[in-house]
Image: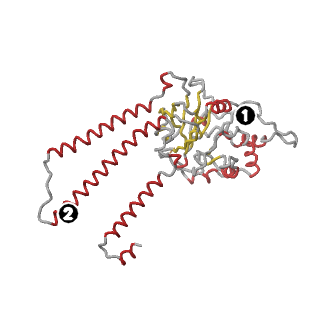
């Protein structure tokens, strides 16, 4: 297009150059807007008090920086053009060196501006550390967030008595009550990760051996997407998380449900059909229960099957699946359990059970055959069918489904 334009117009014709500049500017704007396309992870759309405090700081700072940036660019263009004009004549450009007023002005001006931004920034930093629960205004709920390669685990201490073991252990979907500030205790069981729900607050690193706190609050019920923000290995990009904020009533129901154990299902005796899911439950005990906890499972002697010791504490530990079906996502938030019509997405879960590392990169050393995450268990199609029948018994569907994106 440029070639034709050049042929049909003289080289020095200004409109052609203007058009090119305009096209370049427009292309830049399109790229910028496209980057802001995902509204569910948009830092300029706060959905809670903490994110709003950040937004109330960043917008004025962006505006000030923008005005300064445009002012400097216009000033520079003016000076260049003036100098260019004069250089064509005999006069040297006017020299400003040693101009007292100007030099004081452009030293004091930015200093005052930056001091103002610094005061507002420090005030915001303190404000987002503040949780009214700390002042005893209501009883705090302790939620510990664990980073794993490559998924997030959550443990809820409901009696506030830390150290007794968490009443609820879940993964990927962090469920909170809407309208209540929640302090998360964030740590990691392997490498450094970073927890980030842009609509609810800034980021906080998850560091093994340390606990960092982060406050979140959602104005209203909803689902808020996030992404691990610290490079943590092969599937860092596939380490997503969500906050599901529920109404007070829904959250109370959720708390009750999550504390229920799953029943042992009666196996059919002598060729008779067992309870639905019982074959899958036996497969699960044989194939999955070394890494995945389901509360309520018992071995042949009636002893509880518990993932513990090393497996529960190090990175080999896998998500607790007691109430799998009450979550919207699995595999580190990579896949959704339900489609846009709210129907269980069986095909995707089958593919995951068939060969998990093929669905999500997990081999840090491809030759080792030892994935950091769920391995390919070589399950038969019958076993997969049985397992899915069993997994579908684990919990009720979530009260909130993923909003459809437009
Ligand atoms: Cu975890 Cu990046």
Q: Position of residue 15 (x, y in %)?
A: 34, 69
Looking at the picture, tell me which residue is in the foreground, 233 or 31: 31
Q: Residue at x 14, y 50 (%)?
A: 97
Q: Residue at x 66, y 46 (%)?
A: 337
Q: CA distance from mark 2 to mark 1?
A: 81 Å
Q: Which residue is mark 2?
A: 84
Q: Position of residue 58 (x, y in %)?
A: 40, 41
Q: Residue furthest left?
A: 90
Q: Is residue 97 left or right of residue 149?
A: left
Quadrant location, the N terminus: bottom left
Q: Which residue is mark 1?
A: 262
Q: How dense is the environment of label 1, judged by Cα within 10 Å: few (below 14), some, or many (20 and up)?
A: some
Residue 279 seen in this snapshot:
yes
> Tell me, what colour scheme is on the image?
secondary structure
State which quadrant residue 277 falls in: top right
Q: Is residue 215 left or right of residue 7?
A: right
Looking at the picture, tell me which residue is in the foreground, 239 or 271: 239
């Amino acid at each position: 297009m440029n070639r034709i334009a050049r042929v049909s117009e003289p080289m020095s014709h200004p409109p052609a150059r203007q058009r090119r500049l305009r096209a370049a500017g427009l292309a830049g704007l399109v790229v910028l807007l496209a980057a802001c396309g995902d509204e569910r992870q948009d830092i300029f759309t706060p959905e809670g008090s903490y994110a709003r405090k950040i937004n109330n700081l960043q917008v004025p700072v962006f505006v000030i920086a923008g005005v300064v940036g445009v002012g400097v660019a216009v000033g520079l263009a003016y000076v260049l053009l003036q100098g260019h004009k004069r250089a064509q004549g005999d006069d040297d450009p006017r020299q400003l060196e040693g101009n007292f007023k100007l030099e004081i002005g452009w030293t004091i001006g930015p200093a005052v501006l930056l001091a103002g931004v610094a005061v507002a920034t420090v005030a915001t930093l303190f404000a987002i550390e503040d949780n009214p629960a700390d002042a005893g205004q209501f009883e705090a709920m302790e939620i510990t967030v664990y980073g794993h390669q490559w998924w997030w685990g959550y443990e809820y201490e409901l009696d506030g008595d830390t150290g007794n073991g968490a009443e609820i252990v879940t993964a990927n979907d962090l469920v909170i009550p809407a309208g209540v500030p929640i302090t998360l205790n964030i740590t990691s069981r392997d490498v450094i990760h970073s927890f980030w729900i842009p609509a609810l607050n800034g980021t906080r690193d998850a560091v093994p051996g340390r606990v960092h706190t982060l406050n979140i609050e959602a104005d209203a019920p909803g689902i808020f997407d996030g992404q691990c923000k610290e490079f943590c290995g092969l599937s860092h990009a596939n380490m997503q998380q969500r906050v599901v904020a529920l109404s007070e009533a829904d959250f109370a129901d959720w708390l009750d449900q999550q504390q229920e154990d799953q029943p042992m299902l009666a196996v059919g005796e002598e060729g008779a059909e067992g309870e639905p899911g019982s074959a899958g439950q036996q497969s699960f005990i044989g194939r999955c229960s070394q890494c995945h906890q389901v509360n309520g499972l018992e071995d042949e002697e009636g002893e509880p099957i518990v993932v513990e010791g090393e497996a529960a504490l190090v990175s080999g530990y896998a998500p607790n699946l007691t109430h799998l079906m009450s979550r919207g996502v699995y595999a580190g938030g990579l896949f959704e359990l339900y489609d846009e019509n709210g129907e269980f997405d069986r095909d995707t879960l089958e593919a995951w059970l068939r060969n998990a590392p093929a669905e999500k990169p997990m081999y840090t050393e491809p030759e080792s055959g030892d994935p950091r995450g769920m391995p390919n268990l070589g399950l038969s199609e019958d076993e997969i069918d049985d397992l899915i029948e069993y997994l579908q018994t684990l919990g009720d569907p979530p009260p909130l489904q993923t909003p459809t994106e437009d």
